[in-house]
Amino acid sequence: MRFGRIAGGFVVAALAFMGRSLLGDTTITVPNGSFESPSVPLAQIASPVIDSWTATGGNNTGIFPNLPQDENFGGVVAKRITNADGLQLAFIGAQYDPTGTTDNGTPVINEIYQQLIATYQPGQTYTLSIGVTTSSVQPPSPGSVLRVELYYPGTGGSFQPVAFTLVSSDAATGADNALLKYFTVQTPAVVAGAPYANQPIGILLATTDNSPATGGTFDMDNVTLVAAVPEPGSVMVLALTPLALLRRRR
């Protein structure tokens, strides 16, 4: 099954963030990170195909053109997303129902993902950034979440998470249906013996934490990835903290 999870990921990520100070950043190319390909005409509204990405869930995932201005479609106002990058965005349905099917007969497992050529290099941290908003036409159910994850490929086609965050469609998160709000996921500094060291970097956008009763849609844009080398002091903290915790436990 492709939804393996690593316990304690949040704890490790939090430790990596402590005393964060970076010596230099390197931008890693995310092909079609702004979802500009293929080009979708305004008359077509949306396409389930996203070049460079794999999109599952049939018509529950895809890309759509950003409108030139707010438009009223039979009483439903579709808002222009004013701070989008480029001319198009991606969308993903909030529903997760592996026993059901979409209108074209595919299982309702909504994921958008791609595996990069770049690999997790020891000594570096990786920060994924993405702009997220809620659909003005089909807003996601309150409390439904979008998983934003960095993973590495496991056995049998599984996705093994390195770090992730859950973006919730509620007032606390503050996702707005006319503006993108940016969220980030940062990995710990890669240790040479880590299972994901030198493994391909994977990016996953999914709504598989939700239920069959969940509805609505998240919109996304401008996926970027940056690698950085922490200062030696930060690396030392990361190296010593697990040992200190082990001694404390004993």
Image (spheres, rainbow, N blue to C red):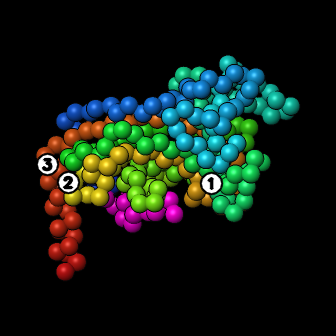
Q: Position of residue 220 (x, y in %)?
A: 56, 37
SS at mark 3 in the image: helix
Q: Residues within 10 Å of mark 1 (few under 14, many from 20)?
A: many
Residue lying farthest to the front in this orientation: 156
Which callout, 1 or 3, points at the residue further toward the start of the chain?
Answer: 1
Among numbered discs 3 and 2, the one appearing first in the sequence = 2
Distance in Å between CA atoms under marks 1 and 3: 42 Å
Q: Which residue is mark 3?
A: 233
Q: Is residue 2 magenta?
A: yes
Residue 109 badge: 1
Residue visible at 33% across and 36% down in the picture: 226
Q: Tell me the kind of residue under disc 2.
A: Ala
Q: Which residue is mark 2?
A: 192
Disc 1 marks which amino acid?
Ile
Residue 81 placement, left or right of 11: right
Over which residues does the magenta segment extend?
1-12
Q: Considering the whole magenta stretch, tell me its main secondary structure.
A: loop
**Looking at the image, which residue is at 43% across and 38% down?**
129
